[in-house]
Amino acid sequence: MMRSAAALILGLTLFCAAAAPAPADDRVVKLLLDGRPVDRAGGVAVAHNGIVYADLVDLVKSFNGLLTFQGSAVEVSIGSTVARFTTGSRTAKIDQGAITMRGPAIMRNGDMYVPLETFVVRVAKAKVRVAPGLSQAEILVNANP
């Protein structure tokens, strides 16, 4: 009986550790696309280690792109641009080349987050403006020069 209880407790402990929450220093960043909120509930973008990250799925949806999940990597297609992001890697493969991002692609609550600036500028071919203090970021697709 004690062994069963101990095994159950150990199993629950390992399960909870595997589903670890995001680090406490992550802060939600309000994300706008041409002045409109990308996600009304919040959580699409976060400040993590001084970098604004955004949920890759939500970003791709915002630009009517396609996603292909391949193990720890995700391949994204927006227009004629194809990019590949791998969890834990700072290298993003974009079209025929590779770039080094400011931070690695990370997993947060089971979703892949990538540095916002890299995705917006290199993949979506748009502009991004981040407020001081990383409280808000705006993607500018239809921006006037």
Image: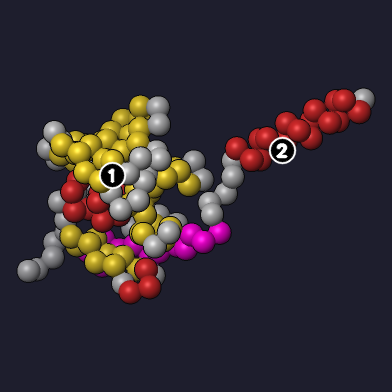
- Which residues are the magenta region? 24-37
In the rendered image, the vertical position of residue 49 relative to residue 94, given as above or below: below
Residue 142 position in % (x across, y down): 13, 61
Residue at 57 percent across and 49 percent down: it is: 21
In the rendered image, the vertical position of residue 101 relative to residue 68, given as above or below: below
Distance from disc 2 to disc 1, alpha carbons, whole Å, reads: 35 Å
- Proximity of marks 2 and 1: CB atoms separated by less than 8 Å: no
Q: Is residue 30 left or right of residue 118?
A: right
Q: Circle 1 sits on which residue?
A: 60
Q: Amino acid at mark 2?
A: Thr
Residue 37, disc: none
Q: Is residue 132 left or right of residue 111?
A: left
Location of the C terminus (image quadrant): bottom left
Location of the N terminus (image quadrant): top right
Of the numbered discs 2 and 1, the one sitting upstream in the chain is 2
Q: Secondary structure at mark 1?
A: helix
Is residue 33 magenta-colored? yes
Q: Is residue 14 left or right of residue 140?
A: right
Residue 136 position in % (x across, y down): 35, 68
In the rendered image, the vertical position of residue 71 relative to residue 57, given as above or below: above
The one of 128 and 60 positioned closer to us in this rendering: 128
The one of 142 and 23 positioned closer to us in this rendering: 23
How dense is the environment of label 2, judged by Cα within 10 Å: few (below 14), some, or many (20 and up)?
Answer: few
Q: Amino acid at mark 1?
A: Val
Q: Circle 2 sits on which residue?
A: 13
Q: Looking at this rendering, what residue extends furthest in the left direction?
A: 145
**Occupied quadrant, residue 39:** bottom left
Residue 85: tell me if it is visible: yes
How dense is the environment of label 1, judged by Cα within 10 Å: few (below 14), some, or many (20 and up)?
Answer: some
Q: Secondary structure at mark 2?
A: helix
